[in-house]
Image (spheres, grey):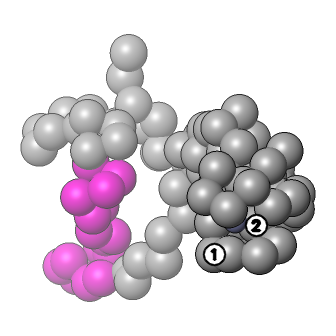
């Protein structure tokens, strides 16, 4: 492949993206500053990042007496489409996990 700007050879460089196993392939000119991402591989990376499960650190808050709660921030609310007053099932599969399950 040739650089569209200066017609020098393009060097293929794999770029790793935080949180994605796939690498994005880019072509960089050996002479000038021309740089492009290969569409197919960069689309794969974007899809992989989009499908990555959300992991957010939340503080446990005190509600009343011995009841505790957590906030669901707007990213979680938006990705699940949940609203105030909806029912949710809570299960505790082991000592390190809380599973929240929405009704269909
Ligand atoms: Zn060039």
Q: Quadrant of the C terminus?
A: top left
Residue drawn at the location 26% of the way across and 84% of the way down: 62
Q: Is mark 1 within 8 Å of ligand 1?
A: yes
Q: Is the residue 67 above or below the residue 93 in the image?
A: below
Give me the residue at 74% from left, 55% from top: 7
Image coordinates of residue 59 in percent, x first then y, are 39, 83
Q: Is residue 31 left or right of residue 77?
A: right
Residues marked 2 and 1 touching at CB (< 8 Å): yes
Q: Provide the residue span drawn in magenta.
A: 61-77
The local crowd at label 2, few if under 14, some if 14 to 19, many if 20 or more residues have their Cα within 10 Å, is: many
Residue at 24% from the left image edge and 37% from the top image edge: 82
Residue 71, image quadrant = bottom left
In-image side of 38 versus 63 (left or right): right
Q: Mark 2 = which residue?
A: 29
Q: Nearer the viewer, residue 3 or 68?
A: 3
Residue 91 appears in view: no
Q: Quadrant of residue 18?
A: bottom right
Q: Nearer the viewer, residue 72 or 68?
A: 72
Disc 2 and disc 1: Cα gap in Å?
6 Å
- Magenta stretch holds residue 70: yes
What residue is pinned by disc 1? 33
Q: Secondary structure at mark 2?
A: strand
Does residue 76 appear anywhere in the picture? yes
- For this rendering, which residue is in front, 67 or 30? 30
Looking at the rendering, which quadrant does residue 103 occupy?
A: top left
Question: Relative to 57, does residue 44 appear above or below in the rendering?
Answer: above
User: Is the CB of the residue bearing disc 2 within 8 angstroms of ligand 1?
Assistant: yes
Q: Residue 68 in magenta?
A: yes
Q: Residue furthest top?
A: 104
């Amino acid at each position: 492949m040739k650089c569209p700007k200066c017609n020098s050879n393009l060097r293929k460089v794999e770029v790793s993206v935080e949180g994605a196993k796939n690498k994005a392939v880019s072509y960089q000119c050996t002479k000038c500053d021309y740089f492009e991402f290969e569409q197919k591989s960069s689309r794969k990376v974007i899809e992989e990042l989009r499908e990555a499960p959300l992991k957010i650190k939340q503080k446990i808050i005190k509600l009343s007496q011995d009841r505790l709660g957590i906030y669901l921030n707007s990213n979680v609310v938006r990705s699940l489409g949940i609203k105030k007053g909806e029912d949710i099932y809570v299960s505790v599969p082991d000592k390190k996990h809380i599973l929240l399950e929405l009704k269909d």
